[in-house]
């Protein structure tokens, strides 16, 4: 009995020892977990519950100058498949097939893949989200992303551009202002339960991001719409590949509208061909044609080589370095003042004026007006235009430049250059973005109007504007005239080489209250019988300008005197040879002449026209310090045929040419072919009958 | 060795309950009991209150989370509606409705009439009348007054 008790006692002791040992092990393990390795296990436990999310920053909005939103960001659902949770992939794929943009096979392949989660379609429309959500498909869930919307659709699409699926700007302002528009993503740490629901009072930490900055444009939504509408209307009337319209406030360089065709809807840009995305007003160049004559006229007037009253002749062509340059008019414009040359858009007249300036001077003006360099409007891929290198410009090139051929410019360059004429000679940098709103007024980025340079004087700019008004009133641009408004402008037609395709344009300066608007309309690659700028671009300009003036509440004023007035007075050129330059110049100016000095000497050695010549008031008298300079000057020979002897002699004298009459009556022949450029010393024999 | 005790002779008059040592111990015990019960109740109530507060906070937090989610949904909906409104009031949409739903057509000819409301109405002020004329008018008024006015005389 005693042994039995002892045995039981020993067994109990043994079991107790085992249990005790196990207990000690458990305690030690617990100490290992709870004390020594607590941090690791705590971290593991937390990481099971705590989820980290990236909070996408909201892309900044874009407003027009009236405060209307033209580009916004909205949350949109993305369809996500969790392949492990999908019970019947065939059924799920067939249910989603008619709803998503991807086909059955692609859906099936994706939802049966090894991935834990896979995107099926990103940033879907709300209506589609409601439809998929209603189906309550197992393993199909949604995540929220930000999507860019353009509420106005096609309006200003070339300016705004578009963003890609990851909200990065791919074109237009969305690309060039991407750094400002896209903010900085934030982070959020949330404690969630097994079902994925947020645990109330759990860990909830946020690293705040920064939303994108809002951008305020100079574009006026209404004017932009009008411009786009006019291009659309033009498409119905004319056969052309595309068009551009720019409306610019010359006083501050603000772009009020910039329209292009063909256009596209940035909400679904992928559905349009690449060529529709091009902002042709910025990215493409064209030959400006006669619209460039404004630059030639302003440069020549500023340099003093010509005045509006100087007499020029057009026998329908002019010879430069052996090449014949024709006028658009088959019969030429005959004898005309420079004001008439502008009004008639006479090519030989402009060539004659251009050649009076030397290459260096004219080239420097072309550069000063901003051609051949980017305007700095801050839109992607802005073209520089094509101005040949200085060394490669010969007489022919110089001559063709005067009427806008042989060089290429962008529409924005042309609009900015003509704005300089409208804005008292000051070239303004084109401005599209007025303000970048950072949310903190002291840190806002304000783009103030910027004067690039003073290109011509105010008096030259005013004179050029006046001369351009007569083009619209009685010249080649009458199709652009609107009753009651003061409009100056110039048409342009440039023919493509070896093709019957034309680029037609019209650029106008319109007085609108306290400022002048510059409106440029271009129609590219026009085919058919109607292709002149006066027939195509000018009517587009008129319709658009009329609507803009109405919208801006600029009332017509018929009381204002229209028309450029020519001074019919004739003056006799005095003899200035031997006089000092200073005295001669002051005497001539006192008498009402314009003076151009050639050479560095002190005394006048030669003059053009010769003394006692009867010529127009305010015409130019050239004074030379050396007879050689006069000798080198080449003068264009007019067509004397059909003129009375006295008239022929008078015209020859006014131009500085020497004629020898043979016979009496009217001129029936001349020894030098009209349009040829000869030295003043060479004599021209005129045959009269 | 038992001592016989005479219970009858016990001093029944002995009032041990009234002894000071007995009273003190008893009251102390009772006080402790009361304090103990009070503490128990207090702690229980505190725990209950704490638990209820925690539950309440959790409930409120859940409600707050739901409200936050709801607010986000409403804000998103509101933004979507704003965009929809902007699309519906865009110039292209207005033109589309005008042309295709209301069958309106664009005017082929336009005439702008300007009403000039800037002209000044010419008014004549007294000061505009020449001084001499003004003087004559005064005399004329006086004469007329004299002629027209009838003075009543008493019979006396």
Image (cartoon, coloured by chain):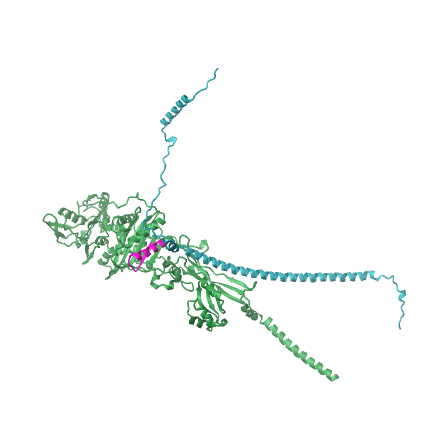
Chain colours: A green, B cyan
Give the left or right position of residue A63, taking residue A483 as reference.
Answer: right
A10 up-or-down from B115: above or below: below
Give the left or right position of residue A484, taking residue A326 as reference.
Answer: right
Give the left or right position of residue A641, taking residue A163 as reference.
Answer: left
- Toward the viewer: A595 or A518? A518
Q: Is residue A130 visible?
A: yes
Taking the view exactly as shown, the residue that stands out farthest to the top is: B156
- Span highlighted in magenta in the image: A225-246
A3 up-or-down from A471: above or below: below
| Residue A157 in which image quadrant | bottom left
Q: Quadrant of the N terminus of chain A?
A: bottom right
Q: Is residue A175 visible?
A: no
- Toward the viewer: B115 or A176? B115
- Residue A476 highlighted magenta (yes or no): no
A245 up-or-down from A1: above or below: above
- Toward the viewer: B95 or B7? B95
Taking the view exactly as shown, the residue that stands out farthest to the left is: A663
Q: How many marks?
A: 0
- Residue A232 highlighted magenta (yes or no): yes
Percent coordinates x, y for residue A427 in the rendering: 32, 53
Percent coordinates x, y for residue A313 in the rendering: 19, 51
Percent coordinates x, y for residue A31 in the rendering: 61, 72
Percent coordinates x, y for residue A172 in the rendering: 37, 60
Give the left or right position of residue A116, taking residue A380 as reference.
Answer: right
């Amino acid at each position: 009995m005693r042994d039995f008790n002892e045995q039981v006692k020993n067994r109990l002791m043994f079991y107790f020892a085992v249990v005790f040992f196990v207990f000690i092990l458990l305690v030690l393990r617990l100490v290992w977990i709870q004390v020594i390795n607590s941090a690791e296990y705590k971290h593991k436990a937390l990481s099971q519950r705590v989820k980290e999310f990236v909070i996408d920053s909201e892309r900044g909005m874009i407003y027009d100058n009236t405060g209307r939103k033209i580009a916004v960001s909205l949350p949109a659902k993305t369809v996500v498949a969790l392949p492990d949770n999908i019970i019947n992939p065939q059924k799920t794929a067939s249910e989603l097939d008619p709803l998503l943009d991807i086909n059955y096979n692609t859906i099936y392949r994706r939802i049966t893949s090894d991935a834990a989660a896979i995107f099926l379609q990103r940033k879907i429309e709300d209506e589609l989200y409601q439809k998929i959500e209603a189906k309550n498909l197992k393993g199909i869930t949604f995540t929220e992303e930000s999507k860019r919307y353009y509420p106005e659709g096609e309006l200003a699409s070339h300016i705004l551009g578009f963003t890609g699926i990851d909200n990065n700007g791919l074109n237009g302002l969305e690309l060039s202002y991407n750094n400002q528009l896209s903010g900085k993503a934030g982070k959020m740490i949330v404690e969630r339960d097994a079902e994925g629901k947020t645990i109330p009072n759990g860990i909830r930490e946020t690293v705040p991001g920064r939303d994108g900055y809002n951008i305020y444009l100079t574009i006026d939504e209404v004017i932009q719409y009008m411009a786009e509408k006019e291009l659309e209307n033009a498409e119905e009337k004319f056969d052309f590949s595309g068009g551009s319209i720019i409306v610019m406030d010359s006083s501050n360089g603000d772009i009020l509208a910039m329209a292009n065709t063909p256009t596209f809807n940035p909400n679904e840009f992928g559905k349009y061909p690449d060529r529709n995305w091009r902002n042709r007003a910025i990215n493409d160049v064209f030959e400006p044609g006669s619209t460039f004559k404004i630059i030639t006229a302003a440069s020549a007037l500023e340099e003093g080589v010509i005045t509006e009253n100087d007499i020029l002749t057009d026998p329908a062509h002019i010879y430069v370095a052996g090449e014949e340059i024709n006028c658009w008019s088959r019969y030429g414009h005959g004898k005309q003042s420079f004001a008439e040359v502008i009004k008639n858009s006479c090519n030989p007249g402009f060539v004659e004026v251009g050649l009076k300036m030397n290459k260096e001077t004219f080239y420097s003006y072309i550069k000063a007006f901003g051609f051949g360099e980017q305007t700095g409007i801050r839109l992607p891929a802005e073209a520089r235009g094509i101005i040949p290198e200085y060394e490669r410009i010969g007489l022919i090139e110089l001559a063709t430049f005067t009427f806008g051929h042989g060089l290429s410019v962008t529409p924005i360059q042309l609009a900015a250059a003509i704005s300089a004429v409208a804005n008292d000679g000051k070239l303004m940098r084109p401005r599209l973005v007025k303000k970048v709103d950072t949310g903190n007024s002291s840190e806002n980025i304000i783009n103030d109007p910027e004067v690039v340079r003073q290109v011509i004087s105010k008096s030259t700019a005013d004179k050029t504007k006046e001369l351009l008004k007569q083009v619209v009133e009685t010249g080649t641009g009458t199709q652009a005239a609107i009753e009651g408004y003061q409009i100056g402008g110039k048409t342009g037609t440039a023919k493509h080489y070896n093709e019957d395709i034309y680029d037609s344009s019209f650029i106008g300066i319109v007085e609108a209250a306290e400022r002048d608007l510059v409106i440029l309309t271009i129609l590219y690659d026009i085919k058919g019988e109607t292709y002149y700028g006066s027939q195509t671009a000018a009517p587009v300009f008129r319709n658009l300008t009329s609507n803009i003036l109405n919208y801006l509440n600029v009332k017509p004023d018929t009381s204002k005197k229209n028309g450029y007035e020519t001074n019919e007075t004739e003056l006799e050129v005095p003899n200035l040879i031997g006089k000092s330059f200073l005295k001669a110049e002051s005497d001539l100016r006192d008498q009402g002449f314009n003076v151009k000095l050639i050479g560095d000497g002190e005394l006048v050695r030669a003059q053009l026209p010769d003394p006692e010549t009867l010529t127009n008031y305010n015409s130019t008298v050239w004074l030379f310090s050396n007879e050689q300079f006069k000798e080198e000057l080449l003068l264009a020979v007019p067509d004397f045929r059909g003129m009375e002897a006295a008239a022929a002699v008078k015209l020859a004298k006014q131009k500085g040419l020497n004629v020898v009459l043979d016979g009496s009556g009217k001129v029936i022949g001349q020894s030098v072919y009209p349009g040829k450029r000869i030295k003043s010393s060479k004599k021209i024999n005129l045959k009269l009958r | 060795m038992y001592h016989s005790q005479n219970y009858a002779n016990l001093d029944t008059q002995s009032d041990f309950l009234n002894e000071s040592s007995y009273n003190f111990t008893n009251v102390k015990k009772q006080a402790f009991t009361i304090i103990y019960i009070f503490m128990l109740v207090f702690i229980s109530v505190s725990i209950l209150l704490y638990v209820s507060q925690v539950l309440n906070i959790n409930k409120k937090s859940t409600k707050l989370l739901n409200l936050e989610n709801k607010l986000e949904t409403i804000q998103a909906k509101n933004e979507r509606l704003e965009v929809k409104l902007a699309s519906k009031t865009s110039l292209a949409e207005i033109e589309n409705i005008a042309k295709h739903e209301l069958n309106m057509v664009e005017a082929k000819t336009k005439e702008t009439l300007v009403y000039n409301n800037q002209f000044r109405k010419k008014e004549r002020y007294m000061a505009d009348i020449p001084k001499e004329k003004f003087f004559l008018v005064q005399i004329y008024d006086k004469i007329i007054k004299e002629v027209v006015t009838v003075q009543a005389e008493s019979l006396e």
